[in-house]
Image (spheres, rainbow, N blue to C red):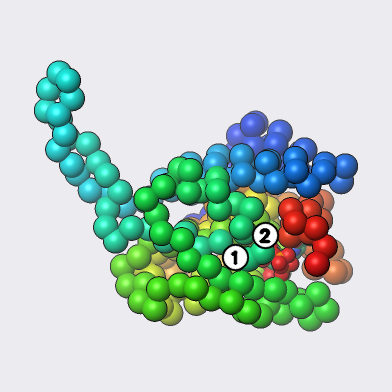
């Protein structure tokens, strides 16, 4: 498993505003989308392309296009939905599938409550979007699900992670072709399983408490 922590002053600046408890939902949503576009640039470094011949106004040349089968973007509902628009802006030809997962706030165990994905993911490159990697339970389960369906390589893009959760995902997915791209690696998890300093509950801050 490869881990890449984005290191860019613009990302750190936007993350600072995102973390601020006084940042209202509309600004929070806009920032998640902007951050996603910046992280998508890092996260798609390994996207598969194939050569294509074109003609410029001056001469023939060879370029590249996104290869088939098209990449699959999988936002984890609910909070991952806030990252989707930023990702499809950069990769408009990708397909989008959905996984709905919720963490039990007492046991911290994830459950999957919705799934809308192709039955066969053989040879597909998948990009999983979830802003928070806390205990790592949700992300590890989501990636395992995609690998079992035949996905060849999976890149997960998260805004924040806790070291404990990252270690858990690494242990669960040892030896698999998985890349994790992070906006920042925070200090730790607290007793309630929240990332410290973190940004609170990403889903609630995006969409309100339900
Ligand atoms: C949050 C977050 C991740 C998960 C991370 O979702 O978006 O999916 O928690 O926690 P973990 O690493 O400990 O599994 P939540 O379950 O709160 O659902 P939501 O997106 O609907 O708010
Ligand atoms: N889920 C969140 O939204 N935030 C955390 O800090 C941990 C899990």
Q: From the image, which quarter does the C terminus lie in?
A: bottom right
Please tell me in which quadrant of the rendered image residue 23 appears. Answer: top right
Q: Mark 1 points at which residue?
A: 76
Residue 37 locus on image (x, y percent): 54, 41
- Which residue is pictured at 38% across the width and 58% down the height? 71
- Which residue is pictured at 71% across the width and 33% down the height? 13
Instruction: Identify the secondary structure beneath mark 2.
Output: loop
State the mark number for residue 79: 2
Residue 46 is left or right of residue 15, and the answer is left
Tell me if the residue at label 1 has its CB under 8 Å from ligand 1. Answer: yes
User: How many residues crowd mark 1 within 10 Å: few (<14), some (14–19), many (20+)?
Assistant: many
In front: 36, or 100? 100
State the mark number for residue 126: none
Real-space Cα distance between discs 1 and 2? 7 Å
The answer to whether residue 172 is above or below residue 202 is: below
Rendering quadrant holding ligand 2: bottom right
Residue 175 locus on image (x, y percent): 44, 71
């Amino acid at each position: 498993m490869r881990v890449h922590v984005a290191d860019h002053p613009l990302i750190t600046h936007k993350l600072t505003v995102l973390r601020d408890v006084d940042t209202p939902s509309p600004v929070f949503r806009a920032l998640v989308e902007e951050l996603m576009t910046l992280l998508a640039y890092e996260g798609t470094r390994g996207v598969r392309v194939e050569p294509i011949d074109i003609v410029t106004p001056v001469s023939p040349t060879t370029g590249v296009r996104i290869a088939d089968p098209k990449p699959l973007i999988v936002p984890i509902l609910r909070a991952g939905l806030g990252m989707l628009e930023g990702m499809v802006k950069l990769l408009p030809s990708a397909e989008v599938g959905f996984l709905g997962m919720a963490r039990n706030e007492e046991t911290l165990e994830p459950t999957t409550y919705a799934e809308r994905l192709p039955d066969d993911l053989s040879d597909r490159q998948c990009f999983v979007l979830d802003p928070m990697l806390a205990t790592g339970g949700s992300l590890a389960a989501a990636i395992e699900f995609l690998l079992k369906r035949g996905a060849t390589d999976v890149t997960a893009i998260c805004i924040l992670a806790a070291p404990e959760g990252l270690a858990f995902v690494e242990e669960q997915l040892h030896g698999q072709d998985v890349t994790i791209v992070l906006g920042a690696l925070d200090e730790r998890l607290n007793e309630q399983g929240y990332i410290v300093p973190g940004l609170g509950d990403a889903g609630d801050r995006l969409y309100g408490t339900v």
